[in-house]
Amino acid sequence: MSAERPDARRDPARLVTGQYRDDANLRARLALHEHFGAGPPWHPWVFAKLPAREGLDVLELGCGPARFWEANSEAVPAGWNVTLTDVSPGMLTVARAAMEAAGLEARVLQLEATELERDGRFADGAFDVVLANHMLYHVPDIDAALRGIRRVLRDGGRFFAATNGMHHMEELKRLAIEELPPGTVEPERLAFDLENGEARLRAHFGSLRLHRNADVLRVTDPDAVVAYVASMAGVAGVPSSELAPDLARALETVAARVHTVLAERGAFEVHRVTGLFEAWRGVRPRE
């Protein structure tokens, strides 16, 4: 079983020191969804798909700042044993504080997802549920990660993998590509998305189901759009005085374009195309 061809955009070291050195860029993107989404809030929508039994062993890969658990803190069943992992030490620092503030206990560990296949900290069949919320497309070898996920799931256990469709947030991608300095943001196909994810999962799991979630964000705050575009460049929250001059000018142009759209249409519309794969280790039970 050969590893995937290396992709610099999915290099863990690059992610840790760049886009995900802390939670600033991720929170800028989450804020747009949380404030302007027309459908049900994302994190509770995903949580509702998880089994509701008490006493489950649950692993989240790529937990980020633990926003999923913050948003669902009051819904977590009694006796869940939660393990959170992320490749970024900065994210884990935020996650620990978030879990404590939410009154939740968790084992918090640094882990790059491909290590799960052979990591001795995780026994075979250790978990009832494994969750990967918008993170598999960052993993350098997705098949290695999926082998590890299958290894640590119990028979009948479930894996939940959230991802985006090819046209997710297309309006903001186009805006960033057109206005940011060349090479800052490049058109790319996710290594794991709604269109190719089923084939990748079927190589490791026999039973699958896809839950789709799509709506239109009607954004009325230009600063929220600029923050999202800045996060795509990895500079969310950085003062303009500390940015490279060409990037600072580009973000000003983005703001001007958004103001024009708001004046003409009342909102900047962005199409959100996401979903959640649900995969079973072993035979899927009848419902």
Image: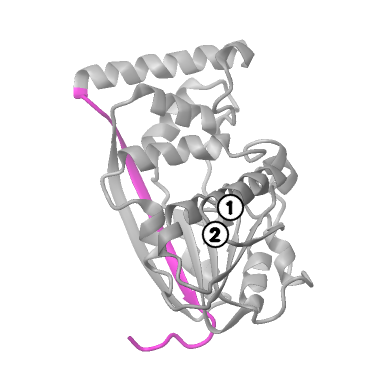
| Residues drawn in magenta | 265-287
282 horizontally vs 275: left or right:
right
Tell whether label 1 touches label 2 (CB within 8 Å). yes
| Furthest-left residue in this view | 265
Q: Position of residue 56 (x, y in %)?
A: 53, 77
Quarter the N terminus occupies: bottom right
Q: Which mark is residue 104?
A: 2
Q: Quadrant of residue 235?
A: top right
Question: Which one is nearer the viewer's eye here, 229 or 180?
Answer: 229
In x, y percent, where is residue 146? 62, 69
Residue 260 falls within the magenta-colored stretch: no
Give the residue displayed 52% in from the left and 78% down from the top.
Answer: 55
Vertical relation: 64 (above or below) 210: above
Q: Is residue 38 above or below residue 43?
A: above
- Crowding at label 1, few (<14), some or many (≥20) Cα neighbours within 10 Å? few
Q: Which residue is denoted by mark 1 in the rendering?
A: 100
Q: Residues within 10 Å of mark 2 (few under 14, many from 20)?
A: some
Residue occupying image coordinates x 48% and y 34%: 28
